[in-house]
Each structure stands twice: as C-alpha cells, then as structure tokens.
Image: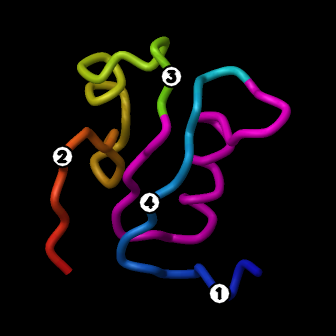
C-alpha cells in the first residue's frame, strides 16, 4: 500500500484527535505516515473539538495544515 501513496502531492486524511482512537487515525499516526510517505502537503480532516485550529496550525510542520469548512483546493 505504501507505494500507492509514496510521494503524493496532496493527502487529505482523517485525523480525529491527538490520542489514539479505536476507529479513526490520530495526529501522531497521521504525521508519522505522511513523513514516511514523503507527501508534499497534508490536510487534516474530521477533527474533533479538542483539535483547536489555531493551536494545531502553529504546531504542525510547514507541509501540514488542518482543513476547514468551505476550503477550496485547486488541483
């Protein structure tokens, strides 16, 4: 599966919260996967209320960002 995503320009990925969850990806896992896959840009979706946009934006590496309602992406 890794070769399918390796080096992609943009990955939009579920990232529910910071702590592990039984059915959703969490922040540490998603950032680890994105780093291993060498993605160009990562957008995090399906964030719960514990994932404050401003705080998360400040903490993420420059190649990652939280997505937001109404966001438009030009491909």
Mark 3 neighbour class, 10 Å CA radius: few under 14, some 14 to 19, many 20 or more: few
- Answer left or right for 29 relative to 73: right
The nearer-to-camera label among 2 and 4 is 2
Q: Residue furthest toward the bottom?
A: 3
Mark 3 or mark 1: which comes first in sequence?
A: 1
Q: Quadrant of the N terminus?
A: bottom right
* Mark positioned earlier in the residue sequence (1 or 2): 1
When the figure is inspected, residue 29 is found, relative to residue 75, above or below; the finding is above
Residue 70, disc? 2
Span highlighted in magenta in the image? 20-46
**Of the image marks 4 and 1, the number of the one nearer the N terminus:** 1
Mark 4 = which residue? 12
Indicate the secondary structure of the residue bearing disc 4. Answer: strand
- Tell whether position 18 is magenta: no
Say whether disc 2 or disc 3 marks the residue closer to the N-terminus: 3
Mark 1–mark 2 distance (CA, rounded to whole Å): 28 Å
Q: What residue would you read off at disc 1?
A: 4
What residue sits right under mark 3 in the picture?
48
Q: Earlier in the sequence, mark 3 or mark 4?
A: 4
Determine whether the residue tagged by mark 3 lies in a helix, strand or loop.
Answer: loop
Mark 2 or mark 4: name the one nearer the start of the chain: 4
């Amino acid at each position: 599966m890794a070769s399918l995503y390796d080096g992609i320009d943009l990955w939009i990925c579920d990232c529910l919260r910071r702590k592990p969850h039984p059915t959703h990806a969490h922040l540490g896992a998603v950032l680890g996967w994105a780093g291993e896959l060498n993605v160009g840009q990562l957008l995090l979706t399906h964030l719960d209320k514990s994932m404050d946009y401003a705080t998360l934006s400040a903490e993420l590496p420059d190649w990652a960002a939280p997505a937001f309602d109404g966001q438009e992406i030009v491909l």
